[in-house]
């Protein structure tokens, strides 16, 4: 039995030839393929015959080969960012979710330095079973949201910042060491991983629901 | 509105007086209280009139003041450890879950150096919607389980090890950088946080189930 | 010309003989002396003839030799802590300020995981020209307060925590990398330094006031 | 109530579109806007219709959209650098202060390797209520100035250096661990933050002055 | 007496002139020479008269000057990679072995996130006396292979990854801290060093064999 | 098929009960058991009925339960230490090898600060197919031996040292970054792992020898 | 030919037996022996017959076995400390120099926070050809002295401090990254090494003097 | 009184205008000027009227404005490198010494992996009162030379390497933690600083010589 998540092709670190071969192999096996960390430069270097078949988004650096699925109804996910520069990572999560048929609700620029911004979306976010939080610099958003929201919280620290926050380590330690109970974390800039974890959670919820109301299946 | 998780009293860093006061305040408000990171030395230093009211477990360093709740039926959680020395942290998670009325299934010593141990419990673990993985040293368990199990995976790196693995950083980076998609992580040795995240996931699943089959409530 | 701040005797790292000698020298010169980082063990090891002359507080590990000054009227300082375990460091600041004749207003346990606690003291804190913020773990308090309070903000990261927050580095990077504009930072656990900086600010304000309204002097 | 400091648009990490949109939004709301960390390359990539409206300084990488305010009389700030290469960061502070109507006195190249340079400006610097100290390499300037100057001292460690001083960590630890009492610190290269903190201090001084001499308002 | 391994010319860090001179000197002494870490840019900068004599492979960044030796019969080596991006480092090992007359068996993409891939080549790998394991990200392959394979295991952590796995440190600590007994490690990305160690092991085996059956020499 | 190395019980991190249970289980299965990192304090805390059955060595912190095997003739191993303080780690390797029936030749105090000491044992060490090198501080021994000895070299960095060499990281980076080709490394202080790797190498040599001279079996 | 510096016995990391054996061996060979890092606890654990022959100083943790030499006339050395807590390390240097017949001039408590203290001893220190500078915390003394003194400067960073300066890394990076030209550094707390380097310098000066005025020998 | 070392203009981090202004100012004051870390790109960006007056060496990235001095007779210095890639840093030292009238003897490629290379120059190096040792990677040269040479030893760790040795930290910790007594260290890649320290030592030797034989002056 599979774990229910389509593998993506991580393009950074691969040569053009390797990336195309991996994507074609996935496409051959599954009829579609998600490519991540495909920089604009790497996209431009692809053979035109291949790149013309991609739905490419330069901000999130993701591409989809093949058709997008229908959106299914097993729940949707909120994605909130602290700043504007965090949107690129958030979109990697949004597009990965969408690639698996899950809708998401993107809320940007609710960093805690202007607390009213977060408070004004609190109720909207509190309705989601799963919330992905994307923040760089010192990542204070994770703890504040952790105290305000009841859902499963997935922190994605980003490498947005400079000096001690330059490479995302400061936001990462804030997520890991959060004083709010039950905040979970992915690797720095890992929007893809956050989306996969959200999919795991939705799948788990569906499994529980099936157990509880067997007649509805 | 609360986030649905009772706060625990983290005893490390508090004086005896501070710890007792915090626990009594929580007990007064909620009728029960969970104390974590209460070392045997700190337990021994408590006033006898207070400590005699606690259900204390020295291995997990947790104590409960007041009655344990009934186990409710919103799903249970698997907790798996790589080694024997990781059991203490796993028990912190088990007892936190139990404090919130959630049963768990503890599987120990399934580290990947003896892969057959993990493979022999794979089906048992794969049935759980949420699996907490507890591993120290290099934390390879997180990635192997990540490829084998479909549920929501919560990695708890432990400080078990020496040299480069001494304080849990190596296991932590393995969890964060896992090549398996969708593994999430807590702070090092944070069994409590893993349990809180599992509770969030079970609550989210219950909320989704309520939305889907309103008649069953 | 002096910089207007009495030096304290930092006792950690000194032998008993060195600490006593330094304190007596300061006492001889100034009629009083502040000793910091004097642990209960170090206090107990002092000659009784010396220690009996001290006003010692074990929680803040500070002692005063000689008389406390009057409280003067050049402004007072707010000191806020995220958690209970941060109070020891906060008291080091409070007693250093008091040693220089400055009153302070201590507010404890306003960490951001329970945001309402901080919001309920916001107006009280906003009235102070200088606010010392004391927080460990991930130090999210610094950024949230930074967005709510107009005064000079002095962050003191504490070594309260474990795993990635164990030695105060995570709180420190949160303070330094705060997305709130103009938050300043001291070394980890440096309540003394925060008080000295607050004294510098109050002295500066007094100097500005003198320039503006010379007749009022 | 606001905290009295206009937010700036941090351009690093933003796409051209994001930066322009943020600046226009701030301009629409406040009639003027400060852009920071706008590199010459990013400036050149701006649409000409937008960039022609900016007062841009490539050394400090700051731009102002809209008119500069009058200089008000609530005190001015000294800014001192250890070396020539630190001037770029110092100018970010100077221009941020100026954007808020505060004059500053820039003193360059007073690093401690040539102690007479610092001693010759000591009296000039000692007259300022707030002094921003900008130094890279090992940042010894912070401690020496800390012993010589009575005002509020704001250290800005810079990333000037190589080897162990390459990214500003050495200067940062010197600022944080300074043996001089009451030195405060910002993030590495954060001239903007230092200016914001100085504004907080001047605002606090003004508030204290108002309390003391209410008739003068 | 020599240690039986021809030194290679490490080209990174050398000017073109230095690299050519070193290679020509080795060629003059031994009739052939291996150049490592010769990037495509550095290769392109070589004088044509020199580069035309090289057998250059851009993926592994290795070049051979002079003739390849015959393959001798003292055993061959397996080289296994976790991902596609690790192949470049693996090829550096393969070509170094081949330069010394040793054949190798390259198996790619057997990372543990898809455990069946590794299990399906287990028997093939278990027949080799020496196995070089090449993995980046979190390097979980090292421990799983360590529990499955009886041969001498040489881990080569690679710098493939991002965030906490960006520069190879995470894979390195996994190799060093492996819970599988007897896994040995080289520097990050050091395919050359792994090959040299494999050669040492094959030489040692040959020496032992000679001792045991002197008649066969 | 097993990997041919008996697992040891790592006692650090285990409670007394856990350690005894693990050792008895191994003893029941294999008739003997090796316990490692059993400190004198932990040994003293064992039940006398158990500890009296152990052959315990406090310097190496190893104990053997059950009989030592005969020494077999598949080759022996040299173990060399840089300093006296490294002998404890070296003995962990020696006793692990002995537990598996392999003899070793221990040479102590051949650190490179007195180069003649190493040169005087060069020929003795050069005769061994496998040499374990144990060194702390800056670990220069690894590179010098790497240039002098033809055998398989297994570096064990130790935590002997202070300041920058305090926890073994300096010796570890020297081993990993050695300019001598083909030096391999274990975790800091991992004498057990070095012995296991040596056993893998001897097993591999035996397998090769069997292939070459089938008649000799 | 020897390098002209007697080796000392570093006692930390050695068992009592190892330390005594090493010291007796040195005594047998040279008639005297210096023991370093011999803590009061380790001294107390020595056999009385041995320890009664030692001249032991608990502050510097050094002991001398055998007679002290005459002071010879090849120059003397200044040793200056920033604070009182640095004196222990300074005395390790002083006693090592004295063990080799070199006098020293110890100046304590001249840290830069009180610059006048250093300036008042400047001329005294400037007369020495070699000055050992001992400082912890942020180590600003190294740079200020580097700009004031013409002699050979040997910085010894100490582990005096807490927070970011806790283990001596901050003082070390200040010494290494000093903006004053030509400051050299030893390991943290390495007073012994500083003394050995000073001896090398005095020996070198004597050699140069011999070359210049051969008649004076 | 000056410290007897001409300051150089460190060009990295300076704009073209700043670098030229600093050099012209030094030239105006002293009649000549040394520029360091002037990269080929920075050199090419200089105004031709200025750069035509420079004696520029691209490998060491140093330039001299004005005339070179005579070589004086106060002793010369040996400079030894472990590898070819370390020569650039060594030449920075050689040219700084030459700028101050001191000759040097450059010996390259004596790294310890081929010990005979170092042993063959041992006597040549042992005759120098001061030896600058330049090595990257793991920096084992420092300890081996430390045991063989009696002179003042100045280690310059270089950033030559990759993986754990990438930025020079490994070589730096080897220099600082050397088991050979009395090795001193500069910052990574700081050939200029090593030369300045050598000048201090030669000046000190001259001062001692003057004291001893006053008639020879
Ligand atoms: N952006 C991403 N971040 C982290 N992991 C990814 C990302 N995209 C793909 N992956 C995972 O990386 C693996 C792809 O590795 P590869 O075989 O080298 O393409 C797959 O297992 C994916 O699940
Ligand atoms: N140079 C700077 N350094 C640090 N923070 C800055 C800087 N410039 C602007 N900021 C702050 O960063 C935030 C802007 O973030 P953003 O919304 O992404 O533009 C504001 O809160 C500013 O106060
Ligand atoms: N001293 C040691 N250092 C590293 N690993 C060890 C050591 N002793 C035993 N081991 C390994 O650690 C594992 C034992 O873990 P455990 O099951 O917790 O006893 C086994 O796989 C051993 O191979
Ligand atoms: N390559 C170099 N490495 C380290 N310090 C240098 C170097 N070149 C010049 N310096 C020192 O750096 C200072 C020059 O700083 P600046 O005033 O910025 O030119 C002078 O005090 C020189 O002693
Ligand atoms: Mg943020
Ligand atoms: Mg494990
Ligand atoms: Mg906090
Ligand atoms: Mg400086
Ligand atoms: Mg991998
Ligand atoms: Mg050693
Ligand atoms: Mg100091
Ligand atoms: Mg080297």
Image (spheres, coloured by chain):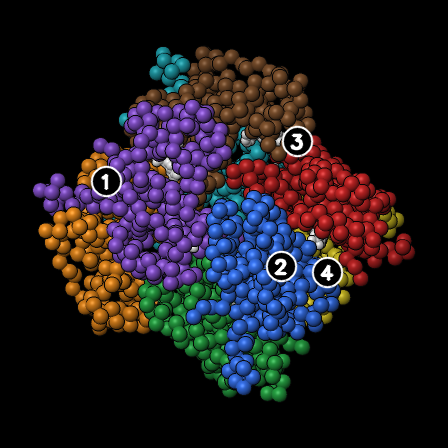
Chain colours: A red, B yellow, C cyan, D brown, E blue, F green, G orange, H purple
Number of marks present in the image shown: 4
Q: For mark 1, name the chain.
A: H
Which residue occupies 64% across, 72% down?
E128
In front: mark 4 or mark 2? 2
Task: Check residue E90 in the rendering and tell me which mark sits there, or answer none.
Answer: 2
In front: mark 4 or mark 1? 1
In front: mark 3 or mark 2? 2
Q: Is label 4 in contact with label 2 (beta carbons under 8 Å)?
A: no
Q: For label 4, count other residues whose C-alpha is less than 10 Å away and answer few (under 14), some (14-19) or many (20+).
A: some
- Do discs 4 and 1 belong to a common subunit? no
- Do discs 4 and 2 belong to a common subunit? yes
Q: Where is residue A23 in the image (x, y as percent from the top left)?
A: 77, 50
In front: mark 1 or mark 3? 1
Image quadrant holding the N terminus of chain A, namely bottom right
> Circle 3 is placed at which residue position?
D15
- Any atom of ligand 9 within 8 Å of the CB at mark 2? no
Q: For mark 4, name the chain.
A: E
Task: Identify which residue, A94 or E125, lies in the foreground.
Answer: E125
- Do discs 1 and 3 belong to a common subunit? no
CA gap, disc 4 to disc 1? Answer: 70 Å
Q: For mark 3, name the chain.
A: D
Q: Position of residue G38 (x, y in %)?
A: 29, 62
């Amino acid at each position: 039995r599979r774990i229910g998540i389509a593998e993506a092709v991580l393009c950074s670190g691969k040569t053009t030839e390797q990336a195309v071969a991996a994507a074609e192999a996935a496409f051959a096996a599954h009829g579609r393929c998600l490519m991540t960390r495909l920089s604009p430069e790497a996209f431009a270097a692809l053979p035109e015959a291949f790149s013309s078949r991609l739905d490419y988004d330069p901000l999130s650096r993701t591409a989809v080969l093949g058709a997008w699925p229908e959106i299914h109804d097993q729940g949707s996910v909120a994605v909130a960012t602290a700043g504007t520069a965090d949107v690129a990572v958030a979109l990697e999560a949004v597009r990965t979710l969408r690639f698996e048929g899950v809708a998401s609700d993107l809320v940007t620029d609710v960093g805690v330095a202007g607390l009213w911004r977060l408070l004004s979306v609190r109720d909207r976010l509190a309705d989601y079973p799963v919330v992905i939080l994307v923040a760089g610099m010192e990542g204070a958003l994770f703890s504040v949201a952790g105290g305000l929201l009841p859902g499963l919280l997935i922190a994605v620290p980003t490498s947005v910042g400079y000096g001690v926050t330059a490479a995302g380590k400061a936001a990462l330690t804030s997520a890991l060491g959060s004083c709010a109970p039950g905040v979970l974390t992915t690797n720095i800039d890992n929007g893809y991983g956050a989306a996969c974890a959200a999919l795991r959670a939705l799948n788990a919820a569906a499994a529980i629901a099936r157990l509880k109301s067997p007649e509805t299946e």
